[in-house]
């Protein structure tokens, strides 16, 4: 059985005429005892031409490690992808039940993998989706690794993502310095998973094991945040802010005109945080309204696991209305840092040195002041700030891997340290 | 099932919520948009549901009447009133919770109820109006002081009491809630004297953190029929001096006075009690 709690952190007071209400929602899942939840897992290995040599050897090791991490009884498949997607194990277009013999046979099949051809990530995901479709009640998960740039058409990729949305959760890994973080970011946004950079391909197996084990720990297939907002109010955004940044705003499924469900994917024993921003019509001083009513629901059964209120209270007291909740401030800063890095890197790629320098230098400052040492260290490899004059300039030579790590890592957020 | 006003769980068939006291059937729709309330807030516009104490009206057979309202700017009604009768005398206590103190509505409710109970007991035991007035105020002060868990957590309120008969009227007070004598003919008379240093700064109140200023009391013999009015600053702050208010029916009078205070701005909670004083 899984239990969930929902905690709302906010400062409810608004100045007269104030409209924007912010809150951080902390959802915590605790698993009382490990239940035999039905799970389905698809492991997707990039076998495009760029994978030849050491890379394909490490990829085979990693895929075998993932197979070893599968719990007995889990339905699984291993597929390989280049320009199209192919079954590696089992032979037919179906899933196999994990056990000693299926695991051994899967590992033998993985050992035969060779690299050649192009990269069509959308095609791979569509095959995974098709396989997972046969287990509608299960916790459905895919693990994707790639080392290269997606060369299928942008439209075909978007169509494939759309088709997979809501059917399974996909975590993805980029290997080497030739892949494009933006492509895996699209997979992550559409399929509610994380994406990560494996800088040293020798670490690939460890990543595979960790992700597969985390997936095996999930006990609830799908939870949604059901958000009610008042008539005449607007939900400006709802985004996951911890452990990674993930915008859910565009994923609303209407329940009624004032209420919508936002998917959060599958859950185990874990904690995630969400930043909600609602714009409400201002009211008279002393008035208090519910600016949002949040319920954590299982969309399939309609069960409500937890609920909470986000309030707005108008006051003439400036000492009250100018205060900001610490958690809201913290995650607002993290989102700003992410945006600055994204804008800075794309300006740099487009050759707009002025914008790139300004954004990345500001990001460096913010990373320094908010104690994001890893991010600050990576930023220092891209932008150089004269400690005396404060003048910033872009570094001429930047290692591709550093740039990718900065790009990928900016979606990971740090949690606010407990006070005291 | 949950209370539409405060979200506390309620059993089907119950007429009132045990948590907040509101009538469960027929909670009026939201005054802002006409929507229904759900677990404490309007399901349409989100406005907070009214609390049972937001607007209270009381009428006794004797003709005494009181009304108390949250006002337009406060989230809670921290005022409280209690009415009673003993030995043919009309009794009333009105209290105003000190906003800066913790749980002010608890302090004012307890003080008003304790005040009227002790007034009645003392008068039945043969005390004079003035000694009953002082005894009731002292007991209310003890009760409020006992609410504190420390000097930094001391609920507080003002206090004004009235004991009114055809031959003698006695008022007692601590703080800036007031009593007026409104004779049928002639100008209004302010009976109390605010315990304040400068505008809005209280020098006396009931609470564990109050210095023992004691209750101030005043008695007079009415020389004509009239109305005794006891009220909080939420009302008297909006009355022109001298008060020339007349009302044939006290309840209508209290309601009209509250509406006057709300129409003038309603910055504070507003509470008023009117007691008719005339020879049988
Ligand atoms: Zn209630
Ligand atoms: Zn409403």
Image: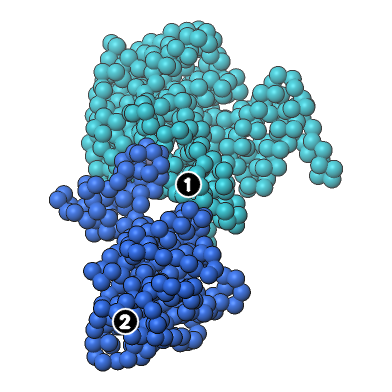
**In the foreground, B111 or B155:** B111
Q: Which residue is mark 2?
A: B165
Q: Quadrant of ligand 1?
A: bottom left
Task: Report whether A138 appears left or right of A63.
Answer: left
Q: Which residue is mark 1?
A: A312
Instruction: Give me the chain letter of mark 1.
Output: A
Q: Helix or strand or loop: what does disc 2 sit on?
A: loop
Is residue B142 visible to us here?
no
Hue of chain B? blue
Q: Which mark is residue A340?
A: none
Local crowd size for mark 1, using a 10 Å CA cut-off: few (<14), some (14–19), many (≥20): many
Hue of chain A? cyan
Residue A236 percent location from the top left of the image: 51, 33
**Which corner quadrant of the image does residue B118 belong to?**
bottom left
**Which corner quadrant of the image does residue A92 belong to?**
top left
**Quadrant location, the C terminus of chain B:** bottom left
Q: Nearer the viewer, mark 1 or mark 2?
A: 2
Residue B163 percent location from the top left of the image: 34, 81
Instruction: Give me the chain letter of mark 2.
Output: B
The residue drawn where x is 26% and y is 18% is A134
Task: Report whether B89 appears left or right of A145.
Answer: left
The residue drawn where x is 37% and y is 28% is A257
Asked if residue B153 is positioned above or below residue B257 in the image, the reply reads: below
Q: What is the CA distance from the residue labelled 1 to the residue labelled 2?
A: 49 Å
**In the foreground, B251 or A29:** B251
The residue drawn where x is 46% and y is 25% is A250
Q: Helix or strand or loop: what does disc 1 sit on?
A: strand
Is residue A220 visible to us here?
yes
The residue drawn where x is 48% and y is 53% is B263
Task: Report whether A253 appears left or right of B73.
Answer: left
């Amino acid at each position: 059985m899984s239990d969930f709690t929902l905690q709302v952190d906010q400062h409810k007071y608004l100045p007269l005429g104030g409209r924007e209400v912010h809150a951080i929602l902390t959802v915590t899942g605790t698993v009382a005892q490990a239940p035999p939840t039905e799970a389905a897992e698809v492991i997707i290995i990039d076998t495009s031409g760029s994978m030849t040599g050491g890379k394909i050897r490490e990829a085979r090791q990693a895929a075998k490690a993932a197979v070893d991490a599968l719990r007995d009884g889990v339905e699984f498949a291993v597929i390989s992808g280049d320009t199209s997607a192919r079954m590696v194990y089992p032979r037919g277009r179906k899933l196999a039940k994990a056990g000693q013999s299926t695991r051994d046979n899967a590992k033998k099949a993985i050992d035969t993998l060779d690299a050649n051809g192009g990269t069509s990530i959308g095609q791979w995901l569509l095959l995974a989706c098709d396989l997972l479709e046969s287990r509608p009640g299960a916790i459905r998960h895919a693990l994707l690794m790639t080392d290269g740039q997606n060369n299928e058409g942008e439209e075909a990729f978007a169509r494939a993502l759309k088709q997979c949305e809501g059917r399974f959760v996909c975590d993805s890994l980029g290997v080497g310095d030739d892949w494009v973080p933006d492509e895996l970011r699209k997979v992550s946004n559409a399929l509610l998973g994380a994406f990560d950079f494996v800088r040293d391909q020798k670490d690939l197996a460890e990543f595979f094991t960790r992700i597969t084990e985390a997936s095996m720990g999930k006990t609830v297939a799908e939870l949604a945040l059901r958000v009610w907002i008042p008539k005449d109010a607007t939900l400006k955004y709802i985004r996951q802010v911890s452990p990674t940044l993930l915008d859910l705003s565009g994923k609303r499924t209407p329940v009624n005109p004032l209420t919508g469900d936002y998917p959060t994917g599958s859950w185990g024993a874990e904690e995630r945080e969400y930043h909600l921003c609602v714009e409400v019509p201002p009211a008279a001083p002393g008035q208090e309204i519910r600016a949002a009513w949040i319920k954590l629901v299982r969309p399939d059964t309609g069960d409500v696991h937890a609920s909470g209120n986000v309030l707005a209270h108008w006051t003439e007291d400036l000492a009250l209305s100018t205060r900001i909740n610490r958690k809201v401030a913290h995650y607002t800063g993290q989102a700003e840092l992410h945006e600055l890095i994204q804008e800075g890197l794309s300006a740099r790629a487009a050759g707009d040195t002025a914008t790139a320098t300004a954004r990345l230098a500001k990001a460096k400052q913010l990373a320094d002041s908010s104690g994001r040492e890893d991010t600050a260290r990576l930023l220092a490899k891209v932008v150089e700030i004269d400690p005396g004059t404060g003048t910033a300039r872009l570094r001429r030579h930047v290692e591709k891997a550093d740039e990718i790590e900065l790009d990928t890592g900016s979606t990971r957020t740090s949690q606010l340290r407990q006070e005291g | 099932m949950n209370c539409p006003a405060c979200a506390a769980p309620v059993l089907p068939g119950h007429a009132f919520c045990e948590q907040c006291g509101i009538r469960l059937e027929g909670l009026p729709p939201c005054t802002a948009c006409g929507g229904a309330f759900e677990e404490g807030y309007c399901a349409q516009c989100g406005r907070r549901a009214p609390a049972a104490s937001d607007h209270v009206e009381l009428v006794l057979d004797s003709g005494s009447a009181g009304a108390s309202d949250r006002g337009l700017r406060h989230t809670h009604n921290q005022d409280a009133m209690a009415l009673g009768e003993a030995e043919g005398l009309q009794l009333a206590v009105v209290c105003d919770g000190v906003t800066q103190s913790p749980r002010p509505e608890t302090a004012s409710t307890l003080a008003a109820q304790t005040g009227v109970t002790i007034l009645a007991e003392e008068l039945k035991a043969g005390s004079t109006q003035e000694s009953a007035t002082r005894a009731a105020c002292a007991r209310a002060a003890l009760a409020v002081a006992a609410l504190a868990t420390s000097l930094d957590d001391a609920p507080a309120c003002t206090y004004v009491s009235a004991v009114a008969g055809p031959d003698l009227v006695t008022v007692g007070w601590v703080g800036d809630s007031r009593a007026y004598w409104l004779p049928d003919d002639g100008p209004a008379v302010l009976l109390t004297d605010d315990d304040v240093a400068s505008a809005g700064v209280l020098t006396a109140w009931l609470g564990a953190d109050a210095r023992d200023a004691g209750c101030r009391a005043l008695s007079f013999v009415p020389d004509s029929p009239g109305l005794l009015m006891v009220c909080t600053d939420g009302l008297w702050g909006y009355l022109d001096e001298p008060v020339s208010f007349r009302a044939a029916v006290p309840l209508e009078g209290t309601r009209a006075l509250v509406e006057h205070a709300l129409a003038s701005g309603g910055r504070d909670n507003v509470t008023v009690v009117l007691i008719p004083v005339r020879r049988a």
